[in-house]
Amino acid sequence: MKKVLLHVCCAPCSTHVVETLKKRFSVTMFFSNSNIFPKEEYELRLENVKRIAALYDLLLVEDSYDHNAWLQYVRGLESEPEGGSRCTKCFEFNLARTAQYAKINNFDCFTTTLTVSPHKNSRIIFAIGRSLGNFLEIDFKKRDGFKHSVELSKKYGLYRQNYCGCEFSLK
């Protein structure tokens, strides 16, 4: 069975994605989200992702949290609207870290939960993923994926955040 490294943005988004991938792959979850602010929010999201990893009996790897590096990466784009250039740079930052971990640790491919959200542009995410190599392109929102993730989130009593993650989306 092929090994896939799954970049996980949050527990609610991961539910449907994990259920979909487990049918065909050996899945390892990768929590790489230096964009999340404040640190308490990061910890709350991580705790919920740990619950999903345990529920589905999956290995979870936590990337190092480096919010300052992320801020430097998106510098100059702070006032961009949600869904604009700052978000594209954020996707690049997190997916590049995921791709690097996947390569170093001999995964067959990597993908992300980001495409389950109707608020994220899958076309942009796919382009970034392709540029990094061995990216598994699946638009998880298709076939009611987002709706299924919401249902599973309620079923498992998961924390559902009301903003994407960074201090700029919090506004």
Image: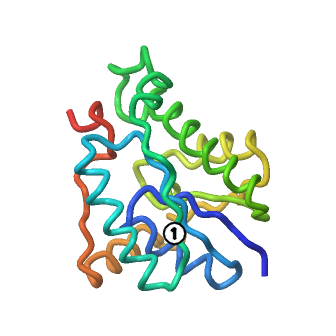
Q: Is residue 144 left or right of residue 27?
A: left
> Residue 64: image x %, image y %?
48, 47
Front one among 24 and 63:
63
Tell me what residue is drawn at x 41 percent, y 77 percent.
Answer: 52
Tell me what residue is drawn at x 23 percent, y 38 percent.
Answer: 170
Q: Secondary structure at mark 1?
A: strand
Q: Is residue 26 left or right of residue 91?
A: right
Q: Is residue 134 above or below residue 25?
A: above
Specify how the rendered protein is coloured. Answer: rainbow
Disc 1 residue type?
Leu
Q: Is residue 168 above or below residue 48?
A: above
Q: Is residue 37 above or below residue 25?
A: above
Q: Is residue 169 left or right of residue 28?
A: left
Residue furthest to the top in view is 76
Tell me what residue is drawn at x 27 percent, y 34 percent.
Answer: 167
> Residue 30: image x %, image y %?
54, 60
Residue position marked by numbered label 1 in the rendering: 60
Residue 137: quarter of image? bottom right
Front one among 60 and 14:
60
Front one among 38 and 95:
38
Q: Is residue 164 above or below residue 139?
A: above
Residue furthest to the front in view is 64
Question: Mark 1 Cα within 10 Å, few/some/many (few <14, many 20+)?
Answer: some
> Residue 101: image x %, image y %?
67, 52
> Residue 149: image x %, image y %?
39, 73
Residue 165: quarter of image? top left
* Quadrant assignment for the N terminus: bottom right
Q: Is residue 14 left or right of residue 162?
A: right
